[in-house]
Image: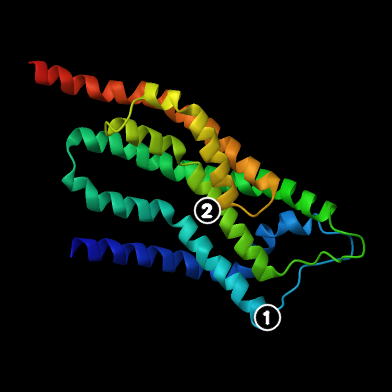
């Protein structure tokens, strides 16, 4: 019953945000399409191939936007469900990580929108063969955009994953530092798998993963020992 109540509250939150955003569905799509619209050759626009795309695509984007904006509520409901089963020390440790994970996800999406999109579209349109009219389909662009948003949003969670791995005793900051070369390789492989097949997007995803991995190592050195020392003192007494 508790789980059902939390899921129902999450669903209501998403639906309320969706209802508030629906009147602005076309404006939201135009805002998120701005990076490509500003870089299209003069006289060219985006197109809608499918008959229902002018209606369904903005609606689909608005539904994703509602879920995206409701993430603090969704994460809170998830936390409220699992928190009673945690020790006090675990709750103190988990709440900052939960807030940080939401902020980092938003930061990853913002990085994709403000940094990756302008560079990627400038490259794509700049290498188009002569005589080819560059007119992206609105639905294809939405899929491309959502893929990069989630790829960068998840990539920016690397520090949280690193801290949790150290806190759980699965590894240590020193062991992670020794595997730095493997992490760089994995970062570029992740960039290849999670982004479209272009060098710019792959590189712009791989480099933040590597940098955030280093941040996670340093943060785990600062946070985890500070959390672990009081427990060891109590055991000694």
Label 2 packing within 10 angstroms: few (<14), some (14-19), many (20+):
some
Residue at 39% from the left image edge and 34% from the top image edge? 162
Check the picture and name the quadrant holding the C terminus: top left
Outermost residue toward the left? 237
Q: Which mark is residue 150?
A: 2
Of 17 and 94, the residue lying toward us: 94
User: How many labels sit on residues?
Assistant: 2
Residue at 33% from the left image edge and 35% from the top image edge? 165
Say which residue label 1 marks.
Answer: 50
Outermost residue toward the right? 131
Image-quadrant location for residue 196: bottom right
Outermost residue toward the bottom? 51
Vertical position of residue 65 compared to residue 98: above or below: below
Of 130 and 223, the residue lying toward us: 130
Q: Is residue 58 left or right of residue 218?
A: right
Q: Is residue 133 left or right of residue 212?
A: right
The answer to which of marks 2 and 1 sits earlier in the sequence is 1
Label 1 packing within 10 angstroms: few (<14), some (14-19), many (20+):
few
Vertical position of residue 172 compared to residue 40: above or below: above
- Residue 140 rendering spot, x and y as whole percentages: 66, 67
Q: Secondary structure at mark 1?
A: loop
**Residue 151 appearing in the image:** yes
Q: CA distance from mark 2 to mark 1?
A: 25 Å
- Residue 193 rendering spot, x and y as whole percentages: 56, 51
Image-quadrant location for residue 91: top left
């Amino acid at each position: 019953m508790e789980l059902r109540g939390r899921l129902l509250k999450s669903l209501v939150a998403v639906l309320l945000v969706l209802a508030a955003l629906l009147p602005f569905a076309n404006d939201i799509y135009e805002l998120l399409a701005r990076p490509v619209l500003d870089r299209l050759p003069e006289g060219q626009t985006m197109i809608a191939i499918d008959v229902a795309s002018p209606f369904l695509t903005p609606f689909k984007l608005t539904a994703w936007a509602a879920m995206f904006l409701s993430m603090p509520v969704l994460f809170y409901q998830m936390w409220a469900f699992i928190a009673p089963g945690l020790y006090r020390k675990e709750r103190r440790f988990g709440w900052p990580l939960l807030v940080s994970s939401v902020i980092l996800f938003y930061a990853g999406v913002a990085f994709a929108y403000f940094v990756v999109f302008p560079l990627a579209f400038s490259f794509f349109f700049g290498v188009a063969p002569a005589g080819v009219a560059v007119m992206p389909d609105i639905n294809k662009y939405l899929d491309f955009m959502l893929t990069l948003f989630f790829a960068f949003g998840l990539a920016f969670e690397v520090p949280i994953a690193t801290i949790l791995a150290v806190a759980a005793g699965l590894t240590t900051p020193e062991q992670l530092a020794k595997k730095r070369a493997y992490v760089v390789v994995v970062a570029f492989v992740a960039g290849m798998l999670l982004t479209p097949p272009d060098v710019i997007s792959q590189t712009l995803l791989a480099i933040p993963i590597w940098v955030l991995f280093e941040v996670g190592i340093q943060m785990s050195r600062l946070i985890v020992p500070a959390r672990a020392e009081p427990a060891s003192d109590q055991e000694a007494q």
